[in-house]
Each structure stands twice: as C-alpha cells, then as structure tokens.
Amino acid sequence: MAASAKQRLSQVTSHLQSSEADIRRGRDVILTKSPDDIVVTCALRTAITKGGKGGFKDTAAANLLHGAFTSLISRSGIDPSLVEDIAVGSVLPPGGGATEFRAAALAAGFPETAAVKSLNRQCSSGLQACVDVANAIKTGMIDIGIGAGVESMSSQYGPQAVTEFSELLESHPESANCKVPMGLLSEDMARDRQISRASQDAFAASSFAKAAAAQKQGLFDEEIAPLTVTWQDPKTDEEKKITVARDDGVREGMTAESLGKIRPAFAKDGSIHAGNASQISDGAAAVLMMRRSTAERLGQQILGKFVAASVVGVKPLLMGIGPWKAIPVALEKAGVSKEEVDIYEINEAFASQCLWCVNELGLPMEKVNPKGGAIAFGHPLGCTGARQVSTLLTELKRTGKKVGVTSMCVGTGMGMAAVWVAE
C-alpha cells in the first residue's frame, strides 16, 4: 500500500475511534438538546397476546397495525397529512405484508400522500423500521415518519414461513446453516457455552416475576393502546367483541423450581423449553418520529430521542450472540460507555442466549428488562423492535432515568442495537 494511502487510512481510523475522553463526556453530549435531534413524540403498542389462543388469535396482522395507527393518531394529535413515510417491520406475511400494510395506513386515516413500506430483518424488523425512518429524517428525505412493527404469529407462523433452499445454497456450509431452527441453535449454544438449565430457569422466573409485578402495578398501561376485536370462543365457536388491553401471556407465581419440571423442547437431555424461551405471540407497535424543531413547531410532546444504532453479522450457528456484538458498536457510535446506560431492553428470544450476552457484556442484571421480557409476555417477531422503544421510553420517564439501549439477536446470525435518550 502506498504511503499516502496508509496515511489516509490512519486518519480515517483515528477519526472513527472514540478517545477515552470522548466516552467519558459522552453521556453529557447525548443529553444535550439540539433542533436537529431526531425525536419520538409518540410510542405505543397493542397488548401482546398468546399465539393461537390469546385475545388477538382471530385478528389479522393488518388489523392490529390499523389499531396501532389509529391510536397513534389519536394519542399524538398529529395531522395525518403531515406524515410522509411509514416503515413497518414484519417477518411472516406473504409478500412481506406490503399491500395490506399500505391498506391499513389508508384505512387508519393517513392520506394517499403518506408512503408505506414493509421490511424484514427478522427479529429486529421493528427496530430497523424505526432506524430507517430516523435516518430518512436525518438526511432530509422526509420531515415526519412512523416506524412500526407487527406480527400475527397465530395465523402465519409455522413451517410454511421457511423457504426451501436451492441446491446452490444447500451446498455452501454457512448458507445451509441459515435455516437451522433457532431452538436447535440455542440448545447447542447453551451446551457449548455451558449455560446451565438452572441458570436459564432462574432467569426466566425473574422475567415472569418482573412482568407480573409491573402488570399488577399498571406499569404497562401507559404504553398499551386498548384494541377492540372480534374473537371466537374455541369452546362454543361463538364470535364476540372483546377489548384487549393486557398482555395475556404473563403468568404469576412462576418459579425456577416450577420451570424446572417442564420437559425440554428440542433435545431429550436439553435445557430449553416452553418456559424459558420467548412466547409465540401477536401484537403491533408504532413510533412517531421527527426533528426536535418540527416537534416544537407543531406542539408535539417529546418523549425522547434516537441517538445511534448498529447492525452486525455473526455466524449463523451463533445467532444468539448478536446483542453481545451489536451493543458495544452502538455504544461506541453514541460515544457512551456501558456504565452510562440506565436501562437495557434486550430481547429474551431464549433465556440461554440473553443470559449469556448479559453476562459476557458485564451488565448489572437490575438494568436489564426491568419490567420483564419476551419470555414473560411474548415476542411477535416484527413487532418487538418497535415495542421495545415504547417500553424503554415509558420506563425511563417513569423512573426519571435518561439513557437506554434496545437490542436483539436476529435470525440467520445477526444482532442489532440502538441508543435512546428520554426527555
């Protein structure tokens, strides 16, 4: 390499690397308010319900999304004609849900001038939708947008959601690994990384306990938008209108001992089971974003702001380590240390992988998922990333804390994370 090229590379590397001084003053920097901040003025979600048997089992994904949209318009008071783009993360719908999600936006009251797209980065789809909108605002492409996520696992989850691989893909080892079921991956990870069943069950029991306590205290009420739907009683086949306003997967009284009696799901001598893995669920979430100057001009209440995000790739067979890889990158981009973060919302796809990531990152357990996580109330795949934004900003505001991180592992071997600040 020529000397001049090496010098340029050195300058770029030096520019990209944060000094210790930068990191030490990072929290103060990101807490500073600027007219160009990308802010969140409304973040909400539907309740999350059990796949196949919960309150939304008979409700289409687009109808859940419609409910989130109408609630967001009502709660924020935003003029729908000002919203220029809507990004919706979703994993399972045929065609990516693009057609019905555009239809849901129109039915919710957004005019034809509001563009809509669907996107699929598997378990991080809802977060990717929010980041896409934030970046579009940051570059000046749009002024106001919505990042959302939705999934009806009741109607669209199953073997049909996985495409058969061609001979070309099957013949490449890493490519073929992309379709190994996540349960098996996590079972292998738990064994290889020596994550005991007892530690997984203790982690899961803590998630249930935190969620049950939060639900009892009404700590989810502010972020949940009640939704009235048609529900068919499985015992009588009678159709009735019900209003769903609570996560119905939360179970009180779950202990490590009771979880220890559940049969392993993926291997006879395995450690992963229905009680220490995320629940199959239905739900939707939506996040309204714009510049601070725009929000102030419109009189919008500011809940918090987007700071930085990261997405990384890892080996497909090590899908679960995604947050461990992605969180440090997001923190470096934001210029803050892990100690300066008040709350971490890390998706509990499996107790094994979430627990391993938390331990390897050296995070205090009391900062992680303080109101429980997907083990306790579910993981509607495309919804979770947007749901976490609502949960995080609501909890930061309630506790008077400021800096938070949302993160998750991603199917086929990826991780994503984002840094947020509450007002």
Image: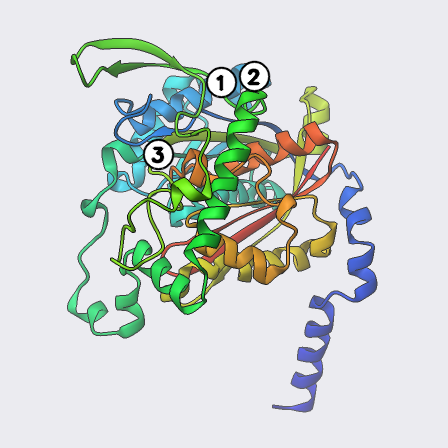
Mark 3 or 2, nearer chain start: 2
Q: Is residue 111 visible?
A: no
Percent x, y of residue 295: 68, 27
Camera-nearest residue between 378 and 106: 378
Q: CA distance from mark 3 to mark 2?
A: 25 Å
Which residue is at a point 39% across and 43% down the rendered structure image?
A: 259
Camera-nearest residue between 195 and 6: 195
Q: Residues within 10 Å of mark 3 (few under 14, many from 20)?
A: many
Percent x, y of residue 27: 78, 49
Does residue 97 sit above or below 358 in this rendering?
A: above
Q: CA distance from mark 1 to mark 3?
A: 20 Å
Mark 1 element type: helix
Percent x, y of residue 274: 33, 43
What colour scheme was applied to this rendering of the protein? rainbow
Mark 3 element type: strand
Which residue is at a point 46% across and 31% down the rendered structure image?
A: 253
Q: Quadrant of residue 371?
A: top right
Left or right: residue 82 versus residue 70 is right
Query: Which amino acid does the dot numbered 1 rest on?
Result: Ser
Camera-nearest residue between 419 and 219: 219
Mark 1 or 3, nearer chain start: 1
Query: Which amino acid does the dot numbered 3 rest on?
Result: Ser
Q: Which residue is mark 2?
A: 75
Badge number at residue 71: 1
Q: Quadrant of residue 287?
A: top right
Does residue 423 sit above or below 71 in this rendering?
A: below
Q: Residues within 10 Å of mark 1 (few under 14, many from 20)?
A: many
Q: Which residue is mark 3?
A: 281
Q: How many marks?
A: 3
Camera-nearest residue between 253 and 185: 253
Query: Marks 1 and 2: CB-CB under 8 Å?
Result: yes
Between disc 1 and disc 3, the foreground one is 3
